[in-house]
Amino acid sequence: EDKVVQSPLSLVVHEGDTVTLNCSYEVTNFRSLLWYKQEKKAPTFLFMLTSSGIEKKSGRLSSILDKKELSSILNITATQTGDSAIYLCAVDMNTGFQKLVFGTGTRLLVSP
Amino acid sequence: DVKVTQSSRYLVKRTGEKVFLECVQDMDHENMFWYRQDPGLGLRLIYFSYDVKMKEKGDIPEGYSVSREKKERFSLILESASTNQTSMYLCASTQWAGANEQFFGPGTRLTVL
Protein backbone atom coordinates (compact mmCIF):
# COMPACT_ATOMS: atom_id res chain seq x y z
CA GLU A 1 0.00 0.00 0.00
CA ASP A 2 1.30 3.42 -0.93
CA LYS A 3 1.87 5.63 2.07
CA VAL A 4 3.39 8.90 3.17
CA VAL A 5 4.33 9.39 6.82
CA GLN A 6 5.10 12.71 8.45
CA SER A 7 6.75 13.38 11.76
CA PRO A 8 6.32 14.78 14.26
CA LEU A 9 2.54 14.94 14.29
CA SER A 10 2.66 18.22 16.16
CA LEU A 11 5.29 20.59 17.42
CA VAL A 12 5.37 23.68 19.61
CA VAL A 13 8.35 26.03 19.37
CA HIS A 14 9.23 29.57 20.38
CA GLU A 15 9.66 32.39 17.92
CA GLY A 16 13.17 32.41 16.54
CA ASP A 17 13.68 28.66 16.81
CA THR A 18 14.63 26.50 13.83
CA VAL A 19 12.42 23.50 13.07
CA THR A 20 12.81 20.46 10.87
CA LEU A 21 9.79 18.56 9.62
CA ASN A 22 10.14 15.06 8.22
CA CYS A 23 8.37 13.18 5.46
CA SER A 24 9.03 9.59 4.42
CA TYR A 25 7.29 7.64 1.70
CA GLU A 26 6.74 4.14 0.36
CA VAL A 27 5.11 4.26 -3.05
CA THR A 28 5.10 2.05 -6.11
CA ASN A 29 5.87 4.89 -8.49
CA PHE A 30 7.45 8.24 -7.71
CA ARG A 31 7.51 11.39 -9.79
CA SER A 32 7.89 14.18 -7.25
CA LEU A 33 7.34 15.19 -3.64
CA LEU A 34 5.42 18.33 -2.76
CA TRP A 35 5.14 20.42 0.39
CA TYR A 36 2.09 22.53 1.22
CA LYS A 37 1.27 24.91 4.05
CA GLN A 38 -2.30 24.92 5.35
CA GLU A 39 -3.49 27.67 7.63
CA LYS A 40 -7.20 28.00 8.20
CA LYS A 41 -8.30 27.23 4.70
CA ALA A 42 -6.78 26.17 1.39
CA PRO A 43 -3.37 24.48 1.36
CA THR A 44 -0.84 26.66 -0.43
CA PHE A 45 2.08 25.28 -2.40
CA LEU A 46 5.60 25.57 -1.01
CA PHE A 47 7.95 23.30 -2.95
CA MET A 48 8.12 20.51 -5.47
CA LEU A 49 11.16 18.23 -5.34
CA THR A 50 12.12 15.76 -8.01
CA SER A 51 15.88 15.30 -7.69
CA SER A 52 17.87 14.05 -4.73
CA GLY A 53 20.20 16.39 -2.94
CA ILE A 54 19.10 19.64 -4.55
CA GLU A 55 17.87 22.10 -1.97
CA LYS A 56 14.95 24.32 -2.76
CA LYS A 57 14.77 27.56 -0.83
CA SER A 58 12.25 30.30 -0.32
CA GLY A 59 13.09 32.89 2.30
CA ARG A 60 13.38 31.13 5.64
CA LEU A 61 12.02 27.85 4.30
CA SER A 62 14.06 25.19 2.57
CA SER A 63 13.55 21.59 1.60
CA ILE A 64 15.57 18.70 0.26
CA LEU A 65 14.79 15.23 -1.07
CA ASP A 66 16.73 12.04 -0.38
CA LYS A 67 15.60 9.38 -2.83
CA LYS A 68 17.91 6.78 -1.35
CA GLU A 69 16.29 7.19 2.06
CA LEU A 70 12.83 7.80 0.53
CA SER A 71 12.44 10.94 2.57
CA SER A 72 12.39 14.70 2.59
CA ILE A 73 12.83 17.41 5.19
CA LEU A 74 11.37 20.88 5.43
CA ASN A 75 13.39 23.38 7.43
CA ILE A 76 12.11 26.65 8.79
CA THR A 77 14.67 29.00 10.33
CA ALA A 78 13.97 31.95 12.63
CA THR A 79 10.36 30.89 13.03
CA GLN A 80 7.61 33.49 13.35
CA THR A 81 4.07 33.20 14.67
CA GLY A 82 2.87 33.40 11.07
CA ASP A 83 4.54 30.06 10.41
CA SER A 84 1.95 28.37 12.62
CA ALA A 85 0.09 26.00 10.32
CA ILE A 86 -0.28 22.41 9.24
CA TYR A 87 2.49 21.38 6.87
CA LEU A 88 1.48 18.72 4.38
CA CYS A 89 3.74 16.44 2.41
CA ALA A 90 2.46 14.69 -0.72
CA VAL A 91 3.92 12.34 -3.30
CA ASP A 92 2.98 12.43 -6.98
CA MET A 93 2.42 8.82 -8.01
CA ASN A 94 3.38 9.40 -11.65
CA THR A 95 0.08 8.09 -12.95
CA GLY A 96 -0.21 10.78 -15.61
CA PHE A 97 -2.94 12.61 -13.70
CA GLN A 98 -0.90 14.06 -10.83
CA LYS A 99 -2.54 11.72 -8.35
CA LEU A 100 -1.16 12.74 -4.97
CA VAL A 101 -0.85 10.67 -1.81
CA PHE A 102 -0.77 12.90 1.26
CA GLY A 103 0.69 12.43 4.68
CA THR A 104 -1.35 13.31 7.75
CA GLY A 105 0.50 16.56 8.21
CA THR A 106 2.58 18.17 10.95
CA ARG A 107 0.85 20.81 13.04
CA LEU A 108 3.33 23.52 13.95
CA LEU A 109 2.58 26.12 16.62
CA VAL A 110 5.02 28.98 17.05
CA SER A 111 4.53 30.79 20.33
CA PRO A 112 5.60 34.43 20.82
CA ASP B 1 -3.84 34.47 -9.90
CA VAL B 2 -5.50 31.10 -10.13
CA LYS B 3 -8.71 30.99 -8.24
CA VAL B 4 -10.55 27.90 -7.10
CA THR B 5 -13.86 28.57 -5.43
CA GLN B 6 -16.23 26.28 -3.61
CA SER B 7 -19.93 26.95 -3.27
CA SER B 8 -20.16 26.87 0.51
CA ARG B 9 -17.74 27.21 3.41
CA TYR B 10 -20.06 25.50 5.87
CA LEU B 11 -22.94 23.13 5.20
CA VAL B 12 -25.23 21.20 7.54
CA LYS B 13 -27.37 18.38 6.12
CA ARG B 14 -29.46 15.56 7.46
CA THR B 15 -28.84 11.84 7.02
CA GLY B 16 -30.28 10.60 3.74
CA GLU B 17 -30.24 13.97 1.99
CA LYS B 18 -28.66 14.37 -1.43
CA VAL B 19 -25.81 16.86 -1.21
CA PHE B 20 -24.09 18.78 -3.98
CA LEU B 21 -20.70 20.41 -3.49
CA GLU B 22 -19.62 22.69 -6.31
CA CYS B 23 -16.13 23.70 -7.34
CA VAL B 24 -15.19 26.23 -10.00
CA GLN B 25 -11.74 27.16 -11.30
CA ASP B 26 -11.02 30.12 -13.53
CA MET B 27 -7.73 29.17 -15.20
CA ASP B 28 -8.80 26.64 -17.82
CA HIS B 29 -7.21 23.77 -15.91
CA GLU B 30 -7.51 20.27 -17.32
CA ASN B 31 -7.46 18.27 -14.10
CA MET B 32 -9.71 18.68 -11.09
CA PHE B 33 -9.80 16.76 -7.84
CA TRP B 34 -11.99 16.21 -4.80
CA TYR B 35 -10.44 15.33 -1.44
CA ARG B 36 -11.74 14.92 2.04
CA GLN B 37 -9.62 15.85 5.03
CA ASP B 38 -10.08 14.22 8.43
CA PRO B 39 -7.97 14.54 11.59
CA GLY B 40 -5.32 11.87 11.75
CA LEU B 41 -6.01 10.72 8.18
CA GLY B 42 -4.82 13.66 6.11
CA LEU B 43 -6.19 14.38 2.65
CA ARG B 44 -7.66 11.44 0.79
CA LEU B 45 -8.61 11.50 -2.87
CA ILE B 46 -12.27 10.79 -3.62
CA TYR B 47 -12.50 11.36 -7.39
CA PHE B 48 -10.68 13.27 -10.07
CA SER B 49 -11.37 14.36 -13.61
CA TYR B 50 -8.90 14.92 -16.43
CA ASP B 51 -11.36 16.29 -18.98
CA VAL B 52 -14.98 17.23 -19.45
CA LYS B 53 -17.24 14.24 -18.78
CA MET B 54 -14.21 12.12 -17.80
CA LYS B 55 -13.78 10.90 -14.25
CA GLU B 56 -11.64 8.46 -12.32
CA LYS B 57 -12.12 6.96 -8.88
CA GLY B 58 -9.66 7.95 -6.24
CA ASP B 59 -8.90 6.05 -3.06
CA ILE B 60 -12.26 6.43 -1.28
CA PRO B 61 -15.04 6.81 -3.89
CA GLU B 62 -17.71 4.81 -2.04
CA GLY B 63 -20.79 6.88 -1.29
CA TYR B 64 -19.80 9.64 -3.71
CA SER B 65 -20.25 10.49 -7.36
CA VAL B 66 -19.03 13.39 -9.48
CA SER B 67 -20.04 15.39 -12.49
CA ARG B 68 -18.00 17.49 -14.91
CA GLU B 69 -20.19 18.93 -17.64
CA LYS B 70 -18.03 22.04 -18.18
CA LYS B 71 -14.28 22.36 -17.98
CA GLU B 72 -14.33 24.90 -15.17
CA ARG B 73 -16.81 23.13 -12.89
CA PHE B 74 -16.47 19.89 -10.96
CA SER B 75 -19.26 18.76 -8.67
CA LEU B 76 -19.17 16.22 -5.87
CA ILE B 77 -22.44 14.48 -5.08
CA LEU B 78 -23.35 12.60 -1.95
CA GLU B 79 -26.33 10.53 -3.09
CA SER B 80 -27.56 9.80 0.43
CA ALA B 81 -25.53 11.59 3.07
CA SER B 82 -24.43 9.66 6.13
CA THR B 83 -22.87 10.80 9.39
CA ASN B 84 -19.52 9.27 8.46
CA GLN B 85 -19.33 11.72 5.56
CA THR B 86 -19.01 14.62 8.00
CA SER B 87 -15.69 16.09 6.96
CA MET B 88 -13.80 18.95 5.32
CA TYR B 89 -14.03 18.68 1.53
CA LEU B 90 -11.33 20.28 -0.59
CA CYS B 91 -11.38 20.79 -4.33
CA ALA B 92 -8.18 21.28 -6.33
CA SER B 93 -7.16 21.84 -9.92
CA THR B 94 -4.00 21.64 -11.95
CA GLN B 95 -3.14 22.71 -15.45
CA TRP B 96 -1.79 19.39 -16.63
CA ALA B 97 -0.39 16.19 -15.17
CA GLY B 98 3.19 17.42 -15.12
CA ALA B 99 2.43 20.77 -13.56
CA ASN B 100 4.16 21.87 -10.41
CA GLU B 101 1.27 22.11 -8.06
CA GLN B 102 -2.40 21.66 -7.40
CA PHE B 103 -4.34 24.79 -6.53
CA PHE B 104 -6.82 24.29 -3.74
CA GLY B 105 -10.15 25.87 -2.95
CA PRO B 106 -10.97 27.11 0.57
CA GLY B 107 -12.85 23.95 1.52
CA THR B 108 -16.38 23.10 2.55
CA ARG B 109 -16.94 21.86 6.07
CA LEU B 110 -19.87 19.48 5.83
CA THR B 111 -21.73 18.25 8.88
CA VAL B 112 -24.26 15.46 8.45
CA LEU B 113 -26.68 15.11 11.38
Image (cartoon, coloured by chain):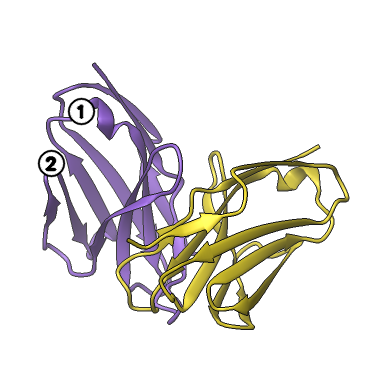
Query: What residue is drawn where x is 81% and y is 48%?
Result: B82
Query: What residue is drawn where x is 43% and y is 75%?
Result: B29
- Figure check: B12 above or below A97: above
Q: Which residue is mark 2?
A: A60
Quadrant in the rendering for residue A95: bottom left
**Colour chain A appears in:** purple
How far apart marks 2 and 1 lie (CA) works out to 10 Å
Mark closest to the chain's N terminus, 2 or 1? 2
Query: What residue is drawn where x is 46% and y is 46%?
Result: A104
Looking at numbered disc 2 in the image, what kind of residue is underneath it?
A: Arg
Circle 1 — which element?
Answer: loop
Circle 2 — which element?
Answer: loop
Q: Which residue is mark 1?
A: A80
Q: Nearer the viewer, residue A80 or A104?
A: A80
* Residue A14 image position (x, y, % from top left): 22, 19
* Residue B49 image position (x, y, % from top left): 56, 76
Looking at numbered disc 1 in the image, what kind of residue is underneath it?
A: Gln
* Residue B54 image position (x, y, % from top left): 61, 83
**Colour chain B appears in:** yellow
The answer to whether residue B40 is left or right of residue A39 is right
Q: Nearer the viewer, residue B64 or B53?
A: B53
- Discs 2 and 1 share one subunit: yes
Q: Are marks 2 and 1 in contact (CB under 8 Å)?
A: yes
- Which quarter shows the C terminus of chain A? top left
Q: Is residue A1 visible?
A: no
Q: Nearer the viewer, residue A10 or B53?
A: B53
- Figure check: A82 above or below A101: above
